[in-house]
Amino acid sequence: MRTLEIKNKMNFKTSIQKSYKTDILVIGSGSAGAMAAIAASQGKYKVTIVERYGFAGGTSTQMLDTFYGFFTPSDTPKKIVGGLPDLVVNELNKSGNIFLRPNTYGAGTGVNYNPEKLKEVWDNLLVKNDIQIFYHSTLVGVENKGEISTCIMFHKGLGFFEITAKRIIDASGDADYCHWADIPYEKAGEKEPAQSMTTIFRMANVNLTEFEAAGGKKILKQKMGDAYISGKHPLPRKEGSAHEMCQPKCISTVAVKVVDFDPLDPEGITKAEIEGRRQSFIFEDFFRAEIPGYQDSKIIGLSNQIGVRETRRVYGEYRLTKEDCMTAKQFKDQVFLCGAPIEDHRKSADGKSETFWQYVPDGGTYGVPYGTLVPKDSATIWVAGRCFSATHDAHASCRSMAQTMSMGQTVGFAAVQSLDTDCEANNVNVSKLQDTLIAQGAILEQPDKVANISRDGWRNNK
Ligand SMILES: Cc1cc2nc3c(=O)[nH]c(=O)nc-3n(C[C@H](O)[C@H](O)[C@H](O)COP(=O)(O)OP(=O)(O)OC[C@H]3O[C@@H](n4cnc5c(N)ncnc54)[C@H](O)[C@@H]3O)c2cc1C
């Protein structure tokens, strides 16, 4: 057992209970991290993933049930993400745990899934690919020694343990590795108002026939607006979205809005969690009292934690901008595509919570360059997921899970190439990386073909 003085901001002494070595270490097993580990596990190098909760998937399993970003939003949707992200959907599809949600919201056609099944699918994919998994383990510090990085983890039963790795992928959402390793980042709220947080709640035993007969989404919108204005139910906002889940008679609702708390501060996130739950039950009362079909329904689940849309975004070799998105810019070194609108949930000038939308023109897509996944001058570190290098606006477009999985897929392959050829993260041969991505089925150029989408099929776009 060794005693370690953890540098980089922490400065405390502790005992390391166990030490591990790996080639590629992924921090966080959200959609980006789990996908990065799967892409990196090609039988050549040891791949390890650490996750602070007891299951993989991050936001995809903690609270959500719809992958956005696979298709462009418009009446003529095109499938623009492929490769390993398809694998996840195919696994869910095999057991009848998806359906395609039509283009009812601005984000476009969604792939709706059963999030509890997805937890098992992530487990199976990680285990099958021989990835060393540490659940209930949180990165709490970093010791950098040249090319090798030692990460200090905390597990509440064991205490502290360390993992030494040659390559690191920070997919923690909050860029925790970069924070501890003093890699520069922008904190949400510093330059633009940070996006709001949302506790998602699920209601069971909804009579959907009655709901639809009474006017469906139209009546919901009208009643929410009335309640908001009259104050009969103290709703935090007058709009929100509610959709059918894979589970019969169950509805998932994204309506709560929590602003003005810092999710990276223990007091801030605590207050946000409490406020998110408070608002959820105000909505429950509203639904039961006002919306036809909901009178016998109740909340059966709140998201595992409040949904945090953005915290830290690193400064990378390239920083994706709003202009890139809104001009549908294409890059020589692009590694995936995005066609999602800017969907910015924030507080407006009058202090109210609103969502602002801006679309990529003509149902088009922009390319996302490799440099957005490499912290500036980085030799051995990549970022993937919502902590990637983008401005506030660009991030508000490029954060759907088909895109975060694409980021994971890219950095997983890049880490392998960097070990294979002994090159640095910012020196990877991007053309070769693109070949690897395309060979796996990734889509790097917008296809002409419109996807033939039906609710009972997934890849039936022939
Ligand atoms: C309320 C809300 C609604 C959304 N709706 C949709 C939607 O409908 N469809 C869609 O496609 N996208 C949606 N998004 C966006 C999308 O879900 C996220 O951008 C995406 O899931 C982020 O993936 P990620 O892997 O980067 O991060 P996360 O999913 O946050 O994963 C990060 C993982 O790292 C773990 N972790 C964090 N810190 C540490 C640490 N120090 N040590 C170990 N583990 C750590 C976390 O527990 C987590 O599992 C929504 C987001 C929010 C918040």
Image: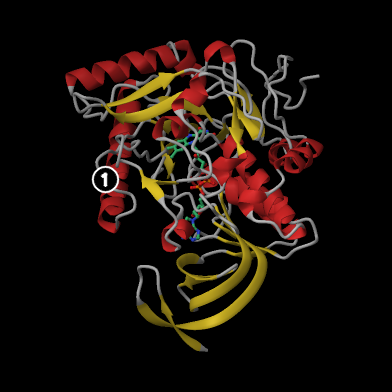
SS under mark 1 = loop
Residue 250 location, x and y as percent?
51, 33
Q: Residue at x 57, y 45 (%)?
A: 373
Vertical relation: 198 (above or below) 3: above
Residue 29 location, x and y as percent?
57, 54
Give residue 298's quadrant in the image. Answer: top left
Residue 124 seen in the current view: no
Vertical relation: 165 (above or below) 110: below
Quarter of the image where the C terminus is located: top right
Residue with the mark numbered 1 = 261
In the image: residue 448, left or right of residue 113 = right
Give residue 126's quadrant in the image. Answer: bottom right
Residue 426 seen in the current view: yes
Colouring method of the image: secondary structure
Residue 195 location, x and y as percent?
35, 36
- In this rendered view, identify the residue nearer to me: 102 or 163: 163
Q: Amino acid at mark 1?
A: Phe
Q: Hey, which residue is sitting farthest bottom in the picture? A: 1
Q: Residue at x 21, y 29 (%)?
A: 234
The crowd level at tag 1 (other Cα within 10 Å; few <14, some 14-19, many 20+) is some
Residue 133 location, x and y as percent?
63, 64
Q: Residue at x 32, y 38 (%)?
A: 194
